[in-house]
Amino acid sequence: MSLALTDGMRDTLSDWLDRERALKNASEHTITAYTHDVTGWLAFLANHLGGGFGPARLSTLTLTDMRAWMAHERGRGVAPRSLARALSAVKTFTRFLAERDGFDATAILSTRSPKFQRKLPRPLTVEAAQSLLSTVELQSEEPWIAARDVAVVTLLYGCGLRISEALSLTGADVPMGEVIRIIGKGNKERIVPVLPVARRAVAEYVRLCPHELAAKAPLFRGKRGGPLNPRLISKVTEAARMQLGLPSSVTPHAMRHSFATHLLTAGGDLRAIQELLGHASLSTTQAYTAVDTARLLQVYEAAHPRAKNGSS
C-alpha cells in the first residue's frame, strides 16, 4: 500500500496521526483504525487515478472519485457501518490537510455517509444480571478463580467499566475505597463510585489469590500469574449465560450496558451517567434512552388491555 504513496503523503499521514495522539488523546486502537482506513483510501486513489499519490492531488478529487471509492468498498463486502467509519477518518484527515495547505476540500467533505441502522445496546434485566453474577461463580472449581471472575464481572455491572478498564487495575487499587480512578478511552480520567458489593467481591478475590499483587502489577491474574486475558471473562460469561438460557447478546460488555440502563430506569441523570461511563459525547449515552423507551413500550403492549385486544 505504502509503495503507491509519495514520501510527502506518508509524512503527512504520520504528522496527522501524531496530531490526533497529542491533541485529541486518540488511543492506539483508534490510531490503528485510522491508519487502516486512510491508507486503504489513498491506495485506492493511487490505483484509480494512476501514478504516485501525494498531498497536492487531494485538492483535485471530485465527488465522482469519492463515489468510485465507496462503490469499490461496497463491492469488497465492507459493511455500511464500517464504510461510514472509514469515511469519517478520511474526512478528518482531509480537513487537517486542507487547513494546513489551504485548499478547497468540499468534494471530499460533502460526501454523504452510507445509511445504516445503529445497533441499540442489549441490556439484561435486573434479575438476569443478578443471576448471571451468581452463576459465574459456579464455573470454576478453583475458589480463587471463581472469586476473580465474580470480581471482574461485578465491576463491569456495578461500576459500568469496560473490560479493558477492569483489567487495567493494578495492585495499587486495593484495598478498594468508595471510588476508583479510571483511565478510559483517549486517556481520559474519570472517578467512578464503587458499590459495597463490588468492594467485597474484589476483597474476596484478593484474599484468595495465590499470586503476589504488587502495586504496579495487574490486579487480575491468569492461572499461572500473568495478566488476565479478557477472552477468559468472555468464556466464563458465555458458559454462565448458556446455563441460564440467556441470549447470545449477553456478553461482558452487556453488563456495562445493563449498568447504564438500570441507572436510567431508576431515575439517573443522563449527564451523570455519561460521566460514569466515560462517554466523550452525550449522544452516545442517549442511546440508552431509546433502550429504556423500547422496554417500556414492550411492557405496555404486553400488559395494557387496549394493546392486547387491538382497540384504539
Image (cartoon, rainbow, N blue to C red):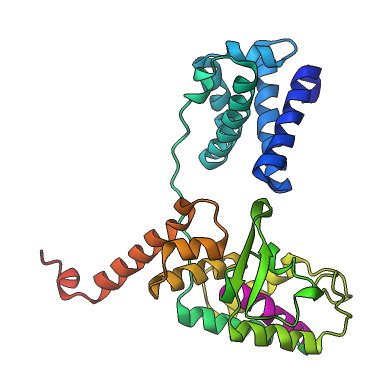
| Above or below for 203 versus 213 | below
Q: Residue at x 81, y 18 (%)?
A: 7
Q: Is residue 273 left or right of residue 59?
A: left
In x, y percent, where is residue 165? 68, 64
Pick the residue in front: 184 or 22. 22
Outermost residue, left direction?
312
Residue 193, located in which quarter of the rendered image? bottom right
Q: Examine the rendered structure and indicate whether residue 305 appears above or below residue 143.
A: above
Name the quadrant containing residue 161.
Answer: bottom right
Q: Position of residue 204 (x, y in %)?
A: 73, 89
Q: Which secondary structure is most common in the magenta stretch? A: helix
User: Could you tell me which residue is drawn at 50 percent across and 51 percent down?
Assistant: 281
Judge whether residue 250 can be spotted in this image: no
Q: Which residues are magenta?
A: 144-157
Dividing the picture into quadrants, the one containing residue 33 is top right
What residue is drawn where x is 59% and y is 31%? Answer: 92
Viewport quadrant of the N terminus: top right
Picture coordinates of residue 250 (x, y %)?
Answer: 55, 69
Q: Quadrant of the C terminus?
A: bottom left
Report the number of numbered marks.
0
Q: Is residue 98 magenta?
A: no
Q: Is residue 221 left or right of residue 130?
A: right
The answer to whether residue 116 shows anywhere in this view is: yes
Residue 70 at what x, y percent from top left?
55, 27
Q: With respect to residue 41, does 157 lie above or below?
A: below
**Residue 21 as seen in the image, left or right of residue 118:** right
